[in-house]
Amino acid sequence: MKAFLDNFAAVLSAATFAVLAMSVTHEYAYFWSIGPQFQTFLTTTDYLANGVLWLPLGIIIVWIYGDWSNMDPPTSRLAGWQRVIGNILAVAFVLFVALTATWPVSFISGILIFSLAVGWWHVRSRRLAGRIKLEEPFQALAWFAIRVGPPILLGMFIWGSVNASSDLTRTDNAYNFRFAGESADHSAIFLRNFDKGVLLRDPVGNKIEFHRWDNIVTISGPVTKTTSIGCRLFNWCVVLAPPS
């Protein structure tokens, strides 16, 4: 505990940098699908603030992968025919992912791409880390960054694309916006909240719109309904009876 408190400033800086890196990666993939020009409206504060949308899931991914990646690969060598079959299956899996994956990435395609990349990096990172020779504790930190960093950033990139795919197709939970100089409300899908304004999707015209805060008079949203966790995370919605 004393060592942690003595290095609290360094730990806080590293944590802030990690969250910012994951947020930038997530938002880059998101706006690559929504529209790259809209990403120029984001500030550093926006990257950190919008991190609350995905940070809980990101922490779970970091914990699961960090724990799983500690497992040692099998030490016994495979026979020749086993390697041939393994290579054939690997090539078939790569071709299947390449032929079925779309952009923005769907949830299923995201799992396939992430599994393929993590499996490859799990083997490759051990060879790469063996070439790095540093004094402790930097050796352990470098090994952890090499082992966990790229897969986590890839996971955030894929998750950003999955979020964009959902936001570009969903029609539920529309908000009502009243703009300056207008008497009627406009129904739109609330995508992002920025320091400079809000990003919306018009479900009728199917277009993305940005409105500055000084152009918005009121915002009203629907009352949250009882939905499954899958609906919240992946837009796999099942109608549930309201709690009695």
Image (spheres, rainbow, N blue to C red):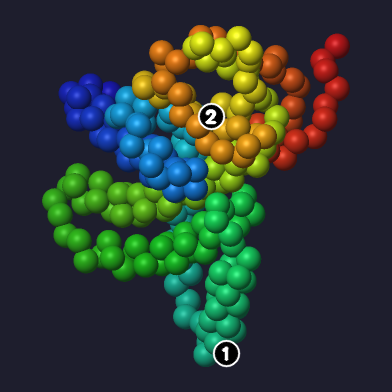
* Circle number at residue 200: 2
In percent of width and height, residue 219 lies at 56, 13
Q: Are marks 2 and 1 in contact (CB under 8 Å)?
A: no
In percent of width and height, residue 15 lies at 30, 32
**For this rendering, which residue is in front, 145 or 71?**
145
Q: Quadrant of the C terminus?
A: top right
In percent of width and height, residue 220 lies at 61, 12
Residue annotated with mark 1: 81
* Residue shown at 53% from the left, 60% from the top: 113
- Considering the numbered disc 2 on the image, is that residue within a helix, a strand or a loop? strand
Residue 21 occupies quadrant: top left
* Circle number at residue 216: none
In percent of width and height, residue 125 lies at 34, 62
CA gap, disc 2 to disc 1? 55 Å
Indicate which label's residue lies in the foreground, 2 or 1.
Answer: 2
**For this rendering, which residue is in front, 75 or 59?**
59
Residue located farthest toward the bottom when viewing the structure as drawn: 80
Type of amino acid under label 2: Leu
Query: Does residue 42 sit above or below 195 in this rendering?
Result: below
Describe residue 39's horizontal placement relative to residue 100 as left or right: left
Task: Give neighbour class at mark 2: few <14, some 14-19, many 20+ (Cα, 10 Å).
Answer: many
* Residue shown at 56% from the left, 38% from the top: 207
Mark 2 or mark 1: whose residue is earlier in sequence:
1
The total of numbered circles placed on residues is: 2
* Residue shown at 28% from the left, 65% from the top: 128
Residue located farthest toward the left when viewing the structure as drawn: 135
**For this rendering, which residue is in front, 172 or 183?**
183
- Considering the numbered disc 1 on the image, is that residue within a helix, a strand or a loop? helix
Q: Quadrant of the N terminus?
A: top left
**For this rendering, which residue is in front, 173 or 227?**
173
Q: Residue 148: in sight, yes or no?
A: no
Type of amino acid under label 1: Trp
